[in-house]
Amino acid sequence: MAYKGKIHIVDDEPIINEILERILKSEGYEIEISKTEKEAFEKHKRSYFDVVLLDLMIPGSDGIRILEKLRKIDPHLIVIIMTAYASIESAIKSMKLGAYDYIQKPFKNEELLILIEKGLEKRRLEVENIRLKEELKKKYSFNDIIGKSSSMQKIFDLIQSVASTKATILIQGESGTGKELVAKAIHLNSLRAKYPFVVVNSGSLPPDLLESNLFGHVKGSFTGAIADKKGLFEIANNGSIFFDEIATINLETQAKLLRVIQEKEFMRLGGTEVIKVDARIIAATNVDLKKTVEKGRFREDLFYRLNVIKIDLPPLRERKTDIPLLVNYFIEKYSKENNKEIHGIDDDVMGIFMDYWWPGNVRELEHVIERAVVLTRSKIITKEDIPDPIVNYNPLEAIHQGLLNKIERESSSYFRKEESNEVEMNEDSFSFKEMVYEYQKELILNALKKANGVQKKAAELLKIKPTTLNEMIRRFKL
């Protein structure tokens, strides 16, 4: 007879154990019997079981406590409670705590066998589901980077191709797209993996402090330098150094960074000793670095040194097929962290997520899921657990606000002061008309998309006359 599964009987009554053992063995099950709580736990620690037949009325033990401990050892364990009529209330309570079902003594053999078969089928489905999830993780993840979209699969391939090389890497993408995760993946899959991965938060430090952090200093080199200090380059020796938001580094520091890349050496602040270093440089930026070069804010020679291998990370709105995968990943992650059992999200919520613009990208999605897991009182995340701005999201309003913000950022960048000197402008450096033109064009395109190409409906969304819209479509050559 084929092996059907392993069953653990936890009961102190010899007659019941003898009867159950005979019935179940004849059906092809492997049997273990425990008469005490201690014996049951010892067997579970060293062996694997599919089903437990648990009597709640074991002398000197609390059956509910046994159930809870067994489920902690194996959360997917099928526990069937055997109970007398007098303890039906306890049996029902045990089901709320994770028991699969209960059967009342004296029971019919056929009834028990059917219950065990159903329990085994449930366990097989759960185990298979876990296996499939693990396979999906392996197929669609790379060092905590999640994605099954073609764009992310290409990035996984690129990471694997460049990780083992010595090439300098430039990662470009919007905030929240996972640039640091990609940098870590490159490091961990390289020959430098056993050496340090050092992160430089380029934009959060003033120039003098940034240089001191990068190159270190000698005692007495400036006020407060009371001892020699190693810089981040020395710490990263033989490993990798990751520059987050490298576009924010000033031109003077850029020149020193270029020398380290070219010569693989530097001097500490205030020092005269040349220090050799071998650290792979991985840089990231959320702006178009080439345009920053054209505007004179980033050295062209440094740009070409960094731009040996370029990895462009797509925003989440351009890889929406990855959203369900990311949602499940973050639910699992934060359920474990918060000791909660969340099974998924409501279909309506998934629809909202698929329609949302995600300006904060994967980081924003992660924070939304973390918040929902913490706040939800059910095992399924619903609309009540999601922030109102996401639930009430209006694509046209979001695009309108996004374009206004873009215009504000672009314009303010030309007029801001750098080190008390006005930024010099030329006649081509800033075009308000051009920005407004692009703004109007994008609003019309998105209105037409929202209206499925129906111009009258698009005009209503934009609150303009259909004739005006028609004229603008001709003018913009849409």
Image (cartoon, helix red, strand yellow):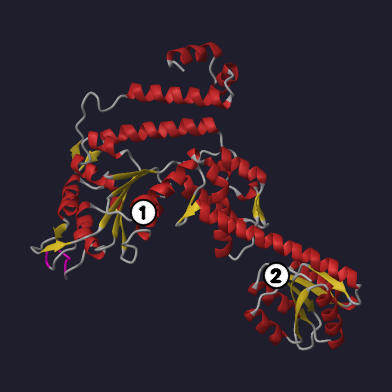
Q: Is residue 267 visible?
A: yes
Relative depth, front residue between 229 and 184: 184
Count of numbered badges drawn on the protein? 2
* Residue 23 rendering spot, x and y as whole percentages: 85, 77
Q: Circle 1 — which element?
A: helix
Relative placement, left or right, of 240 versus 268 is right
Q: Residue 432, located in which quarter of the rendered image?
A: top left
Distance in Å between CA atoms under marks 1 and 2: 40 Å
Tell me the number on the disc at residue 77: 2
Tell me the number on the disc at residue 90: none
Relative placement, left or right, of 349 versus 195 is right
User: What amino acid does circle 2 point to?
Assistant: Leu
* Residue 186 rendering spot, x and y as whole percentages: 36, 55
Instruction: Give neighbour class at mark 1: few <14, some 14-19, many 20+ (Cα, 10 Å).
Output: many
* Above or below: residue 192 compared with residue 13: above
The rendered magenta stretch, by its main secondary structure, is classed as loop
Question: Which image quadrant: the N terminus?
Answer: bottom right
In the image, what residue occupies the spot 49% across and 53% down?
141
* Above or below: residue 387 compared with residue 442: below
* Residue 330 rendering spot, x and y as whole percentages: 54, 55
Residue bounds of the magenta highlight: 220-226
Q: Circle 2 — which element?
A: loop
> Label 1: which residue?
183
* Residue 279 rendering spot, x and y as whole percentages: 24, 59
User: What amino acid does circle 1 point to?
Assistant: Ala
Q: Is residue 342 visible?
A: no
Question: Residue lying farthest front?
Answer: 1
Relative depth, front residue between 461 and 137: 137
